[in-house]
Image (cartoon, rainbow, N blue to C red):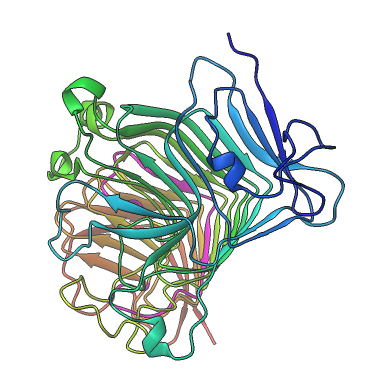
Amino acid sequence: MKKSTLYYVSSLNGNNSNDGLTPQSPFLTLDKINDLSINAGDKILLERDSVFDNQFLHLKNCGDINCEPIEIASYGDGDRPPFINTNGNGIWLQDYGMPLDYSGHVYKGNVSSSILLYDTENIIVKDIEIANKEEYTTPQNYSAPNKMDRTGVAVVAQNRGTLHSITLTNLFIHDVNGNVYNKHMNNGGIYMTAFKPDNEEKTGVARYDGVTVEGCYVKNVSRWGIAVGYTYRHADFATKFLDDETFKKFGNENILITGNYLKNVGGDAITPMYALKPLVEHNVSDSCALEINDRYYTKAGKRMGKVAAAIWPWKCKDAFLIYNEAVDTKLNQDGMAYDADSGDGTTYKYNYSRLNEGGCVMFCLGEAVNNTFTNNVSYDDLGGILSPSGNPDAYVADNEFYMRKGVPLKRKRNHGKMTLKNNKIIIID
């Protein structure tokens, strides 16, 4: 087995003529790493207090679940984590290889990503600061319809079948202003996707088994906060009831999103997608959907309308969302804290919501089945606390709804079916 290699990079005292193999001989810039073949067990260490302006870190086709993990981390005694400040560099071509489940969703185009993990598995990325900002002068420039998508961290599965063990922890990702409209491009703070393989018969279905996003601070990003992980195999999930085997063949497994804080997100805050039993716990969404309104969302064209919520699963089976908090989600066609969206068996328990302009929770459309909302607390949510939007069987029990006088329990023009049991309604001044 090949011995692991440690690579050191420092903007403070590095030199690209160095070998990069010791803290005393670090590389100066990240492009030295991008030019290397990274092997299982290798470590890429960036010196604290370093600032890598106009740079990016892209790893492709590396890692092995049967070996030691690759690590991207920091070293040294500085006061600030190493800072990758990309400024629109690190451009790569995203292409799902086929249209998505809605014809208006953009599925290919150029993306700028500070960190890109493309067909990379068994990797840990931790203790890094990331920004990918574009300066703009007017809201019209900011909301241009064909503006390039940007990401703090982008992850892609395509030509290596199932990717295992991807861990993102203690990252500070901020000021990533991508395209306001593109929901399913790698666009926002952290976004993971699966593209159609060049030869699926040979490599297998591109999917994820083992993703952890933990303890990250995501601030001032557009369009998504954290999303894991939209797939080219979306047609395999176009049914009301979903079985475990479908996910084990075509979807994602062992997804954990925990202990993250998201502040000022342009669209949706946290969403696991096409996942079997994802666990979303101890996260906070503080002010999301900031751009899903008539000021910013102005040139959508044929894209989908103004819809965004805070913490919710899409097309998942037995998603479990517990001990989360969602505050100050802005009003749009959705605008609620939580949303059981077209999934089977979603459970919300022991979550808290406050001052969300679209209410507390939605059960979305006819493919939202077997979903329960129990033991949660809603305090001064607005617009209508519950949104049973065409769903057949939501179960809402043992919750506490602290409601402002005049706010309805059910949002207007919502006609799904709910069973309400043992809920407490407390009117507040």
Residue located at (59% from left, 40% from top): 33
Q: In the displayed image of the protein, which residue is found farthest to the front?
A: 17
- The reply, left or right, for residue 347 in relation to residue 201 is right
**Prevailing secondary structure class for the magenta stretch in the rendered image:** loop
Residue 322, x across and y down, in percent: 49, 48
Question: What percent of the width, then of the height, locates residue 98?
Answer: 15, 48
- Dividing the image into 4 quarters, which one contains the N terminus? top right
Q: Is residue 321 magenta?
A: yes
Residue 160 x/y as whole percent: 33, 27
Work out whether residue 365 or residue 165 is closer to the camera in this orientation and state it: 165
In the picture, residue 111 is in which quadrant? bottom left
Q: Give above or below for 334 relative to 54.
A: below
Comparing 280 with 38, the one in front is: 38
Residue sitting at x 41%, y 73%: 289
Considering only vertical position in the picture, is 132 above or below 78? below
Give the magenta-colored segment's residue range. Answer: 313-335
Instruction: Determine if residue 16 is in view.
Output: yes
- Res 429 quadrant in image: bottom right
- Horizontal side, residue 211 vs residue 241: left or right: right
* 14 vs 100, nearest the viewer: 14
Q: Is residue 71 above or below residue 299?
A: above
Instruction: Name the residue at 28% across, 33% down.
Output: 206
Locate residue 40 relative to residue 140 in the image: left or right.
right
Report the residue at 25% width, 83% height from top. 299
Classify residue 306 by image quadrant.
bottom left
Residue 52: in magenta span? no
